[in-house]
Each structure stands twice: as C-alpha cells, then as structure tokens.
Image (tube, rainbow, N blue to C red):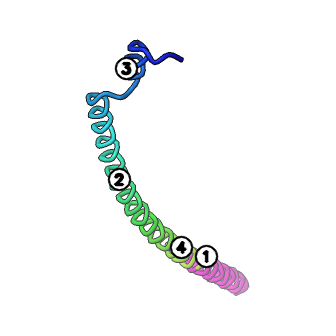
C-alpha cells in the first residue's frame, strides 16, 4: 500500500467531521430527553396502576358486601313468604272448619 495523497484524502474523507459529531451529539441529547420523558411516564403509569388496583380492591369488597346483603335480604324475604304461606294455610283450614260447623248446625 502506497502512502499517496489520494490515499490520505480517502482516509480523511471517511473520518467524522465536526458537523457530523455535532449532529450526533444533538441526536444523543434528544434521545436522553426522550428517555427521561419515558421514565417520567412510566412512573406516572405505575402510580395510576397502583391507584387502579386499590380502586378495584375497594370495588371488589363492596361487591362482596352487596352480595352478602342481597343474600340476607333474599333469605329474609323467603322466610317471610314461607310464614305467610303457613298463615294462609292455617286461615284456610280455619275457614274450612267454620264452614263445616256452620253447615252442621
């Protein structure tokens, strides 16, 4: 390999120029800013996620309590209905007894 002017010109042409380095530096600064913004967004998303988990936990607990209350109400209604049915049957028997007595007399 001969060390000629053309060889040195070719080698110098392949080296980074000041403008190239400034452009690269600008790109690195932009990327650093973007990464910083992403970190901020991730932290905000993590906080939102924690808040949502807490809200969902509260909703779940409320639903459990509502389900329990609904079952209690349903059981109480069913018990009342059974009591009314028993009273109705008793009244019907009393009426039947009265009719029998009335027709016998």
Residue 23 lies, in percent from the top left, at 29, 32
Label for residue 64? 4
Q: Nearer the viewer, mark 2 or mark 3?
A: 3
Residue segment shown in magenta: 76-105
Cα distance in 3D space between marks 3 and 4: 74 Å
Quadrant position of the C terminus in the picture: bottom right
Query: 90 and 62: which one is in front?
Result: 62
Q: Nearer the viewer, mark 3 or mark 4?
A: 3
Label for residue 13? 3
31 left or right of 7? Answer: left
Where does label 1 land, which residue? Answer: 78
Residue 21 lies, in percent from the top left, at 31, 33
- Contact between labelled residues 3 and 1, with CB atoms less than 8 Å apart: no
N-term mark: 2 or 1: 2
Query: 12 and 1: which one is in front?
Result: 1
| One can see residue 99 in this view | no
Q: Name above or below for residue 57 compared with residue 13.
A: below
Q: Residue at x 27, y 30 (%)?
A: 18
Of all residues, the one furthest to the top in this rendering is 6
Query: 2 and 36: which one is in front?
Result: 2
N-term mark: 4 or 2: 2
Q: Nearer the viewer, mark 1 or mark 3?
A: 3
Query: 22 and 6: which one is in front?
Result: 6
Q: Residue at x 61, y 76 (%)?
A: 78
Q: Secondary structure at mark 1?
A: helix
Cα distance in 3D space between marks 1 and 3: 93 Å
- Contact between labelled residues 4 and 1, with CB atoms less than 8 Å apart: no
Label for residue 41? 2
């Amino acid at each position: 390999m001969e060390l000629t002017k053309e060889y040195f010109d070719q080698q110098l042409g392949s080296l980074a120029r000041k403008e190239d380095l400034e452009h690269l530096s600008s790109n690195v600064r932009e990327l650093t800013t973007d990464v910083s913004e992403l970190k901020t967004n991730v932290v905000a998303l993590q906080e939102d996620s924690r808040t949502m988990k807490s809200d969902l936990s509260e909703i779940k607990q409320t639903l459990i309590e509502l389900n329990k209350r609904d079952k209690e109400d349903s059981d109480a209604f069913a018990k009342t209905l059974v009591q009314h049915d028993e009273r109705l049957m008793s009244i019907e028997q009393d009426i039947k007894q009265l009719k029998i007595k009335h027709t016998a007399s």
